């Protein structure tokens, strides 16, 4: 018995040094930040702000590696099946939490096959419209939708669940139009092919500032300092809230020391004044949340959107 206890003690004593060794060995080659959305959206823009700083810290090239398709699940599955050594990092969004409500047979388990590393930024979603739409704020949009039930369509950057939530709370009928990312959605809004779109503020800032689209409102319960002039959609749909978050994940089995190293370095980069300024300019609020807290948040988000899907009568397909 004594010898077994002694062996257990030695094993636990060695664990921390071993994790330290793993962390020191990372990175040993190019680090790929897997982007599961089309290029040009806020996910891509945010990654490119962080990349040079991470490359400098890690003394390795850090590159964007797009794996687009199936509402972000192609990229998530790619990382879930990658070597658990920290060299393939999934940088995804709220779509990660929507997926279990949308897909009946995900090729990965979102709660077990991927390890949450950190929350990078948070950005309330925003509804924008083509300038020709005869509505300029949440109440006018709801009045228009009630006058033309089912005629208005809203593009979604990957998932329609927030639109369903808005329509239920506003008691209106709106047709949803799925897009593979915010980039293609913006192009169609500017071209007048779809009158409305919903995505993260960070995805729409450039389009709105150019005057080629107008803001209807933000999908937060109150006005946000990221775009203070926009009224909350909750003014016309009480209780409606849809916040876009962007976070990083690594494959299950990645050593805890590597996870901590990635999280700590990202948190340090997010504290750099110029980085914070640039992220704010594209509508992102930097975080750097600890891994354990982020994991709890991800679980809570999955449960929330499961409830929305059930209320809307949406079944995973």
Image (spheres, rainbow, N blue to C red):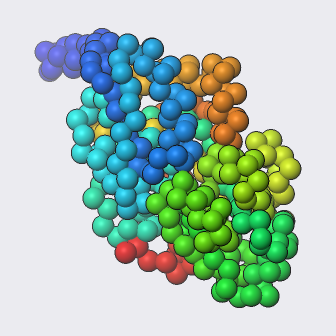
- Residue appearing at x 52%, y 46% in the figure: 40
Q: Looking at the picture, how far across and down is residue 274, in whole percent?
A: 66, 21
- Residue appearing at x 34%, y 48% in the figure: 67
Report the side of 15 relative to 95 (left or right): left
- Residue appearing at x 43%, y 68% in the figure: 102
Quarter residue 250 falls in: top left
Q: Looking at the picture, how far across and down is residue 188, in whole percent?
A: 58, 65
On screen, 58 above or below 111? above
Quarter residue 119 falls in: top right
On screen, 52 above or below 81? above
On screen, 315 above or below 250? below
Q: Looking at the picture, how far across and down is residue 2, in whole percent?
A: 16, 15
Q: Looking at the picture, how far across and down is residue 234, in whole percent?
A: 79, 64
Report the side of 48 relative to 107 (left or right): right
Quarter residue 289 falls in: top right
Name the residue nearer the viewer: 277 or 120: 277
Q: Is residue 13 visible?
A: no
Q: Where the N terminus falls, by quadrant?
A: top left
Q: Is residue 125 visible?
A: yes
- Residue appearing at x 44%, y 77% in the figure: 315
Name the residue nearer the viewer: 315 or 167: 167
Q: How many marks?
A: 0
């Amino acid at each position: 018995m004594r010898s077994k206890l002694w062996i257990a003690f030695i094993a636990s004593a060695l664990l921390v040094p071993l994790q330290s060794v793993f962390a020191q060995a990372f990175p040993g080659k190019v680090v790929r930040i897997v982007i599961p959305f089309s290029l040009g959206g806020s996910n891509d823009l945010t990654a490119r702000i962080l990349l040079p700083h991470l490359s400098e810290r890690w003394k390795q090239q850090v590159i964007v590696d797009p794996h687009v398709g199936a509402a972000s699940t192609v990229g998530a599955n790619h990382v879930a099946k990658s070597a658990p050594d920290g060299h393939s990092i999934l940088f995804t969004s709220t779509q990660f939490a929507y997926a279990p409500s949308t897909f009946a047979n995900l090729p990965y388990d979102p709660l077990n096959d991927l390890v949450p590393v950190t929350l990078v930024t948070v950005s309330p979603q925003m509804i924008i419209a083509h300038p020709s739409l005869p509505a300029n704020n949440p109440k006018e949009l709801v009045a228009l939708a009630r006058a033309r039930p089912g005629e208005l369509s809203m593009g979604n950057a990957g998932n329609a669940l927030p639109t369903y939530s808005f329509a239920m709370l506003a008691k209106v009928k709106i047709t949803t139009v799925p897009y593979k990312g915010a980039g293609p959605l913006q192009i169609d809004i500017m071209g007048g092919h779809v009158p409305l779109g919903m995505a993260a503020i960070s995805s729409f800032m450039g389009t709105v500032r150019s005057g080629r689209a107008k803001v209807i409102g933000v999908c937060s319960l109150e006005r946000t300092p990221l775009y203070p002039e926009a009224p909350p959609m909750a003014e016309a749909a009480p209780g409606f809230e849809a916040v876009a978050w962007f976070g990083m994940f690594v494959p299950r089995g990645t050593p805890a020391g590597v996870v901590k190293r990635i999280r700590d370095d990202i948190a340090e980069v997010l504290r750099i004044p110029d980085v914070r300024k640039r992220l704010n300019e594209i509508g992102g609020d930097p975080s750097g949340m600890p891994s354990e807290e982020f994991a709890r948040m991800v679980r809570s988000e999955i449960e929330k959107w499961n409830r929305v899907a059930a209320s809307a009568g949406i079944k995973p397909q």
